[in-house]
Image: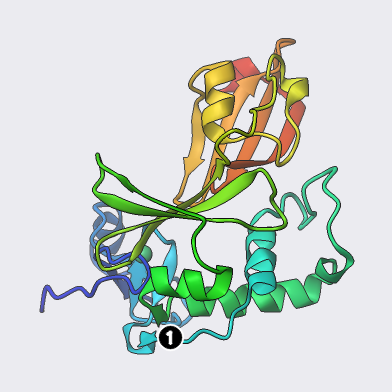
Amino acid sequence: MSDFRPGCTRCGRTTLPVHWGFPAGDAFEAEERGEIHLAGCEPPPAAWWCEPCQAYIDTSAARPGPTTVGLADFEQYLLRDMYMLECKDPDGVSLPDAYLDLTARRQTWQRVRDEMFSVLPAFETMAEILGPPVHESVAEAEGLRLHAFSLPLWPGYWFEVAGDDRGHVVHERFVRVPGHPSPRLETVSDLRPWNALLPEVEAAFGPLPRNFIQQFYRGLVTNDGQGRRVELYFCRDLLKAIVIDPERPMEALE
Ligand SMILES: [Zn+2]
């Protein structure tokens, strides 16, 4: 069997071969070792899987631009990732009327996601979709190029895309526009969807236990000061939901 594994069309990192059907032999162990991805019983949409992107990768779909995605489509795509609990938008967030059709949003999300994994190189595609970056820099430590974009739906933040030399997207996150103040965060009640970033929350409440981490989604658990368990959900480092669960006291945490 060949050891060839293609790079992800989005982030450039090495993909995993996808196995499907009833797992045979040591398939479960191989998945735990990070050697394969198990797709389940249905044929997967592609033969390769990118773990950091959490996506099936169809390398034959990769092609140079142009893209058909526009800025409003991209905002809808991010919005759907901000969904929380029974597909509700973040509490207290009011959206433009044009963005309220959830069926259209789901379709747009799929279309944008398909594009994100097929149109290369990614930096140029992002600029095609979002306009030229408002700021460019280099993250010396990681050797990544950072392009920051301004999105009308999230004023006060930049959408920062980190990419390698070839323009593959390695990371995306929201960052505060320089000069825009962070909120005062003294208690959990100061937290609201979209008002704080992961580093700001950790600066206020200390490093928090993480109940899951993927490239774009993070869940943290803290204490509201009254012994109640508080789950904080972030999408691309932006706080999207706060869930206070009085049924699960902090002691119940593993
Ligand atoms: Zn990837």
Foreground: 128 or 72?
Answer: 128
- Circle 1: is it few (<14), some (14-19), or many (20+) Cα within 10 Å? some
Q: Residue at x 71, y 73 (%)?
A: 106
* Residue at the extreme left: 2
**Kind of residue sitting beneath label 1:** Gly
Residue on which disc 1 sits: 65
Please indicate whether residue 31 sits to the left or right of residue 43 in the image: left
Say which element carries label 1: loop
Foreground: 156 or 114?
Answer: 156
Please indicate whether residue 33 sits to the left or right of residue 152 in the image: left
Q: Residue at x 80, y 70 (%)?
A: 102
Q: Is residue 163 above or below residue 205?
A: below
Please indicate whether residue 156 sits to the left or right of residue 210 in the image: right
Q: Whole-percent x and y of residue 4?
A: 14, 75
Count all numbered tags in the image, as a single digit: 1
Q: Residue at x 35, y 69 (%)?
A: 49
Q: Whole-percent x and y of residue 42?
A: 48, 80
Foreground: 144 or 133?
Answer: 133
Q: Is residue 81 above or below residue 66?
A: above
Residue 238 in which image quadrant? top right
Q: Is mark 1 within 8 Å of ligand 1?
A: no
Q: Is residue 253 above or below residue 159?
A: above
Residue 234 in which image quadrant? top right
* Residue at the extreme top: 226
Q: Quadrant of the N terminus?
A: bottom left
Ligand 1 is located in which of the four quadrants?
A: bottom left
What colour scheme has been applied to the protein in the rendered image?
Answer: rainbow
Q: Is residue 118 above or below residue 219?
A: below
Q: Whole-percent x and y of residue 29?
A: 26, 55
Q: Whole-percent x and y of residue 131?
A: 55, 69
Please indicate whether residue 98 sits to the left or right of residue 85 in the image: right
Q: Residue at x 70, y 41 (%)?
A: 194
